[in-house]
Image (cartoon, rainbow, N blue to C red):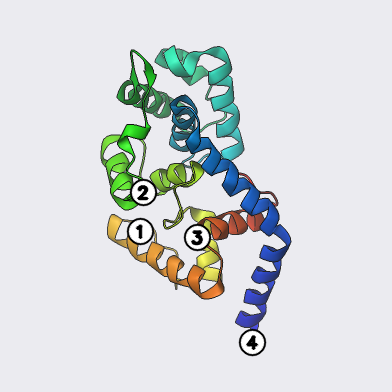
Amino acid sequence: MQHNDELNELLSSYRKKRYQIKKKLKEFKDLYKGKDEHIFRELCFCILTPQSKAIYCDEAIKELVRSGLLSKGGKSDIRASLSRVRFPNSKASYLIAARKAFKNSRGFDVKSKIDEGNIPKTREWFVKNIKGLGYKEASHFLRNIGLGDNIAILDIHILRNLKRYRVINKIPSSISRKIYLNIENKMRVFSQKIGISLPELDLLFWSNQTGFIFK
C-alpha cells in the first residue's frame, strides 16, 4: 500500500512538472542542432561533474568560455577556474585532453564521433576514448545534447530513487559496466511501466531531490 502511495506521489509530481521537464529536454535537443563548440562545452561540463555540484560545474564552464581558456588555456589557468570543483588538477587535464581530441584547425568537431542511430555504441566510444568519462558521465553528456532517450544517468540521486521505488534492492558500492547496464535496464523497464521516459524520469528524480530542474 505504501509503495502504491509513493508511486502515485511520483506521478503527481510528474504531472506538475511535466511542462518544465519537456521544455528542458527540448532545449537539449536544440543544442545538438547548433554548433559543435556548444556541444563540446556540454561535454566539458559533464567531465567536471563527478563528485561535484552541477551548478558549480556549470559556473566554471561559463567562466572558462568567457575568459577563452576552454578553447586555448593551459592547465594551470584552467585549474584556477575550477576552485569549486572537486579534483581540479585531474579535471583540468581531462578538459585539455578533450580539447585535443575534438579541436582542429577549423574549430571543434564532436558530431563526427556521434552515431545518432546507435547511441549505446556512441557511449562506448566516449567512455573508451575520452579521459574522465565513465558510463554515467557519457550518458549525462548524450542526454544533455538530446540523445538520451534510451539511456540512464546513474548518479547517486537516481540510485537512491531507484531503491526508494524498489527498482533495485540496494545501491552498489561500485558500478562495473555489467552492473551499470543491468540497473539501466531495470530503470528502463520501470520507466515504461509508469509511462515516463528515461530522460523525463531522470529530471523528475533530480528535481524532487534538489528542488529545481537543471541538467
- Confirm or deny contact between disc 1 and disc 2 (CB under 8 A): yes
Q: Position of residue 79 (x, y in %)?
A: 47, 20
Q: Quadrant of residue 81?
A: top right
- Confirm or deny contact between disc 1 and disc 4 (CB under 8 A): no
132 horizontally vs 82: left or right: left
For badge 1, the amino acid type reads Tyr
Instruction: Give whichever of discs 1 and 3 has the lower sequence position.
Output: 1
The residue that mark 2 highlights is 135
Q: Position of residue 71 (x, y in %)?
A: 44, 16
Which residue shows up at 34% across the image and 40% down it?
114
Which residue shows up at 50% across the image and 28% down it?
38
Q: Residues within 10 Å of mark 4 (few under 14, many from 20)?
A: few
For badge 3, the amino acid type reads Leu
Q: Position of residue 80 (x, y in %)?
A: 51, 18
The residue that mark 1 highlights is 180
The residue that mark 4 highlights is 1
Instruction: Give whichever of discs 1 and 2 has the lower sequence position.
Output: 2
Q: Residues within 10 Å of mark 2 (few under 14, many from 20)?
A: many
Instruction: Give whichever of discs 1 and 4 has the lower sequence position.
Output: 4
